[in-house]
Amino acid sequence: MKIRCINNTGLSLRSYEYEPITNKEVFGRFGVSEMAEYGIEIGKEYLVMGLITFQTYQAYLIDDNGFISACPCQLFEVVDNKVNSNWHFRLIEKDEDIYPFVQAILGYPELCFDKHVYENLIVEMKQDTRRIYFRRKMELEKN
């Protein structure tokens, strides 16, 4: 699956809020204020490595210049909607540390089978987890 960035600010997400927010410093359902800027480039295409369903929105798991992040889907348009046939799905269980913040994950096998991969990849930025991510990305880019 490939996507193209069409927006990269918290301000651009305001129209997707459930209720209008008048204070630009208030965090909305995406966990950012109007002043937030995502480290993604408008017009650039990204290979989606996973879909993360958070408590209040869905995000694409992507990387830009080696920085891996989960960015709200509303910041992108879909360029190629084909999903890899090797992707898996995992519903997050109530006893996991990332619940209820993260509800479900869809993506490459290790992203779904390892209960700590999201934390290791996004929060802790562990090198072994990042290596697996980029190895899987190289495999997808060859197809």
Image: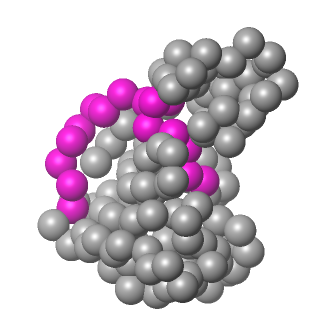
**Is residue 72 on the magenta stretch?**
yes
Q: 82 above or below 116?
A: above
Which colour assignment does the render follow?
Answer: one colour
**Is residue 65 on the magenta stretch?**
no
Furthest residue toward front: 19
Coordinates of residue 6 in the picture (x, y in percent): 48, 22
99 or 133, nearer to the observer: 99
53 or 126, nearer to the observer: 53
Along the horizontal axis of the image, is 104 left or right of 87? right
| Quadrant housing residue 88 | bottom left
Along the horizontal axis of the image, is 94 left or right of 89? right
Which residue shows up at 29% across the image and 71% down it?
A: 89
| Quadrant housing residue 103 | bottom left
Along the horizontal axis of the image, is 35 left or right of 38? right
The quarter of the rendered structure image containing the C terminus is bottom left
Furthest residue toward right: 25
93 or 139, nearer to the observer: 93
Coordinates of residue 33 in the picture (x, y in percent): 75, 29
Provide the residue span drawn in magenta.
Answer: 69-84
Coordinates of residue 106 in the picture (x, y in percent): 33, 64
Work out whether residue 131 can be spotted: no
Which residue shows up at 60% across the image and 54% down it?
A: 69
Which residue shows up at 79% across the image and 28% down it?
A: 26
Which residue shows up at 21% across the image and 72% down it?
A: 86
Work out whether residue 143 can be spotted: yes
126 or 138, nearer to the observer: 126
